[in-house]
Amino acid sequence: MISQTAAAPLPRNCTFEAADWDLLSRCWHPVALVRELEEKPLGVTLLDVPLVLYRAGGTIVIADDLCPHRGVPLSMGTGNGETIACAYHGFRFGNGGKCVRVPAHPDSAIPSKLNLRTYPAVERYGLIWTCLNSDGTVTIPPMPHWDDPDYEQINCPWIDIAGFAGRQVEGFIDVAHFAFVHTETFADPDNPVVPSYMPRMTKDGFEAEYRSTVSNFPVGHEDWEKPGFEWLRHFRVHVPFVATLEIHFPDDGRLVIMNAASPVSARMTRMFSPICRNFDKHIPLQAVYDFNRKVFEEDRALVEAQKPENLPLDPTLEAHVMADRSSIAYRRALRGMGFSQFFSA
């Protein structure tokens, strides 16, 4: 459920419908990999809002990427692991976004107006999450097996997609595109049939179990066509923009992929993809990064080409077939949250 706190101000040059932005600002989104954030401040954007991330001792600070003195982005500055300094006049900011030093007047009291506007920061699945309009409740979707010691935890580099997050998530949960989009990575172009399946609505989205003979081994793998094996793909979708896919491999193998689509704007998405698995743990991480990048690059080309760029929530505005039941369930869940008919701008 989305909290009913007071609406936050819209960002400058907002690309979302105002009502959609307000709802999205109450949700938790990932903005960076934990390993990206070192001593130097890190600039990111969420929902058209420029943010700066920095380390202040044992905490992570997320604030507006704007020095309150003369409006220079703080991500242009420097850091030392305890504070960051603005590149223009050297004003220094520490824990909680508090201004702790004004070099031009080192002995004067520092007015509270120089403190930064900050947002909550939570580390989970190797990602840094935040909420622009939080009521204090942390609602980050679960990831199956992430904390299981029998599983290897992997965090792939993010990928930027010039498209709307809703379209990207819809592509991730689509089961009819494998034979036409992923033939260079894992799918069989001669096996396009989608068996019947039925999504089940949940309190924050839906789940769908899809069984087929389409392999999830890389093309060329010795077991790519494993006779008689039925692959189970279990999707769990948490609106607005997070989904997990748990794939059941032979010999009780499990692979879980989280698709966390962070809405940089209504026209740009930064997709984070934590992965965990209980097999092939000897394979070098770079090989895992490369394979998953190739899969998501195959998807990216289609998402960036789709029209309309937004995700129409009215089911009569696009044609549907039985294989699209997950897409229909996704749109139904988004409508249930109160998003506009044309989601989003």
Image (cartoon, rainbow, N blue to C red):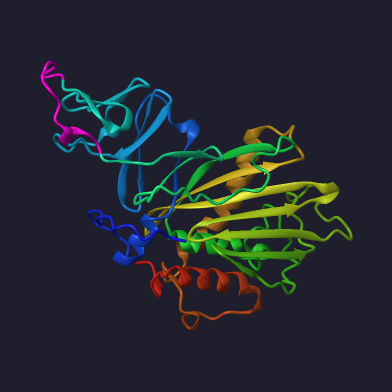
Residue at (47% x, 71% y) in the render: 336
Residue at (77% x, 49% y) in the render: 220
Residue 41 occupies quadrant: top left
Q: Front-most of 296 and 337?
A: 337
Residue 250 highlighted magenta (yes or no): no
Residue 279 shown left or right of residue 139 in the figure? right
Q: Is residue 342 above or below residue 35?
A: below
Q: Is residue 128 above or below residue 210?
A: above
Q: Is residue 36 visible?
A: yes
The number of numbered discs placed on residues in the rendered structure image is 0
Residue 179 rendering spot, x and y as whole percentages: 68, 64
- The part of the chain drawn in magenta is 103-116
Residue at (60% x, 48% y) in the render: 294
Residue 153 rendering spot, x and y as whole percentages: 64, 37
Q: Front-most of 260 and 335?
A: 335
Q: Is residue 278 above or below residue 41?
A: below
Residue 11 occupies quadrant: bottom left
Residue 108 highlighted magenta (yes or no): yes
The majority secondary structure of the magenta stretch comes to: loop
Residue 178 shown left or right of residue 162 in the figure? right
Residue at (68% x, 58% y) in the render: 183
Residue 25 rendering spot, x and y as whole percentages: 36, 55
Q: Is residue 223 visible?
A: no
Residue 49 rendering spot, x and y as whole percentages: 30, 49
Q: Is residue 201 above or below residue 230?
A: below
Quadrant in which the C terminus appears: bottom left
